[in-house]
Image: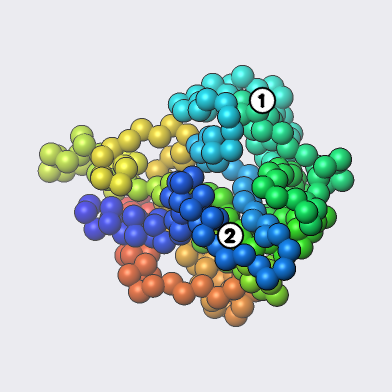
Amino acid sequence: MADIVESINIVSSFLAQEDLSNPCEVNHFLRTLPNPRTGQPTDTIVFCASSVLALADTVFSAFSAAPPIAGEESKITRSIAHELQGMPEARVLQMIAEKWFGIKAVNVGDPGAKILPHDVDKLLVVVEDQSTNCGANASESRKVLEACGVSSPRSIVVVQYPTMSRRTVATFRKTYADLSPRLVSWPTFTPRVALDLKFVTSNSSTESPIQQLQYADRRGVITHDEGLWGLTRFVDLIMGEIPRLRDDENGYGPKGKNFLVHVDIPQDVDNAWRFLDTVLEQQSRQR
């Protein structure tokens, strides 16, 4: 089981690409960027819509004067559930930002929805609700930024599901290949797993390997993150990502569907993925 735990954590860490871990690191990153030779620099944070509300809590809290709502994600969802039916995820996040964090978001074309050459320290929050996949996140975000006067951002901080962060950054690199802004990933957390305590002292179990796991923090201490995917779903997500990142005829890189730039997959990540693939295949045959 230790090999399974280690392999899942290796793949998960690679996919999350946690370049920045918290708002303080984001702030330091932005403050230490070099200034352009001409004009005011514009830095952007692109929050790709997410059903994992812990991301919204972290990001919105960093820009809000309202008190944090830690632990209240499920209450928020229940209280506005009737209003969410049929809404794009971006609009759901807009509602949460405005209703609970006091952050006002605007649409392209609204009064004030523009970064002007003389603007300094202006915070502009704009909603993009047309994208339906990872690639569209990048292309539609660029359209929105350009419509708001940001044709050449100095930096782009990408906030995305940690299971999709590396792929999303790679699509932004392709979309902005002609400008090459500083692109970094801020997944807000990296999912990790550990062996469930009730199985630690057990010599045998009828449960599948994945069912013997729980989410854990950086120290390996079991956590109970109700807002995250079930463990089986989480493992399915990370196992599906590596084939997409491969730069071959079946992947999303230049040699395949050409949705993103080339991504190097380290040997330890590839080995971990292949080990898990074998374990899961054996488990499937035993059902």
Q: Is residue 199 visible?
A: yes
Q: Which mark, residue 168?
A: 2
Instruction: Give how far across and how far down residue 60 sits, in percent.
Output: 58, 37
Kindly indicate the quadrant of the structure image that contains residue 273.
Answer: bottom left
Foreground disc of the pair 1, 2 = 1
Q: Secondary structure at mark 1?
A: helix
Reading the image, the residue beneath label 1 is 99
At 21% from the left and 54% from the top, the residue drawn is 2
Instruction: State the residue in front, 118 or 192.
Output: 118
What is the CA distance from the residue labelled 1 to the residue labelled 2?
A: 28 Å
Mark 1 and 2 residues: CB-CB less than 8 Å, in contact? Answer: no
**In the displayed structure, does residue 219 sit left or right of residue 175?**
left
Instruction: Give how far across and how far down residue 285 sits, in percent.
Output: 36, 56
Q: Amino acid at mark 1?
A: Lys
Instruction: Give the answer, above or below, for where 266 lies relative to 17.
Output: below
Instruction: Give how far across and how far down residue 71 sits, in percent.
Output: 45, 26
Mark 1 residue crowding within 10 angstroms, few (<14) / some (14–19) / many (20+):
few
